[in-house]
Image (cartoon, rainbow, N blue to C red):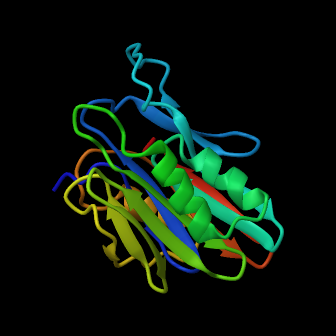
Amino acid sequence: MYVGRFVVVGPEVGAYRVSSRSFPNRELTARDEALTVGPTEDAPETDNPYVSYNCLRVVETPTGETAAFGNGSHVDPIAEKLEVGYPARDALAESLLALDYEKDDYDTPRIAATIGDGGEALIGTVRTDALLVETVDEPTLVATYEMDTPEPFDLEAETAEAAAGEVYDHEFEHAVCAAGVARTDDGFETAIENGD
């Protein structure tokens, strides 16, 4: 099954996977403050605004660190709102509503998730017909296609590296790259799987 891009989040660990039929020549890169999706060196040029974006950021909030991740440019405003003290629910809802679903040929939903320092995890999506933000207490998935309403997902990983690998290797079709994030005693760890 092809579900497009998807996030999985639980109270301790989460992951984001890029799955793509249209733009498979992409990879994840670790930057100072974010994990970024972008074209590989051999990718054909495109002016598509949805191909490159920060997909995961860990930010310092007034109550501790929080990880925010998702499938597009809405990750930055979510992270920025968290930094200035917005509750995660409000940061997700306001950013998803403001940027709305992607105005492409498929009206692609925007999806996002957060994991707080205290183990609070939320997942959200904005589609043509709904804005959903939910608190989760078990691994939960939302995807851009087919599975565009949050639902339980069997994620066994306990580390960022394992989470990235597990979602990358999942049977959903057209895996391109994946990011993982996990809460540890020393803060959040992140990991990248580019399928090399």
Say above or below: 163 vs 30: below
User: Position of 11 compared to 30: left or right?
Assistant: left
Q: Using the rendered view, name the quadrant where residue 106 is placed.
A: top left
Q: Residue drawn at (30%, 44%), measured in percent from left and top?
A: 108
> Residue 142 at x, y = what percent?
35, 64
Quarter of the image with the C terminus in it: top left
Q: Quadrant of residue 124?
A: bottom left
Where residue 148 sits, quadrant-wise, is bottom left
Tell me residue 123's x, y (percent): 47, 68
Residue farthest toward the right in the current orientation of the protein: 62
**Outermost residue, bottom side:** 137
Depth order, front residue of 76/176: 76
Task: Report whether 70 appears left or right of 106.
Answer: right
**Residue 183: x, y in percent?**
67, 74
Residue at position x 43%, y 30% from top? 51
Question: With respect to residue 65, does 71 lie above or below?
Answer: above
Spot occupied by residue 119 in the image (x, y as percentages of width and height): 64, 82
Residue 149 visible in the current orientation:
yes
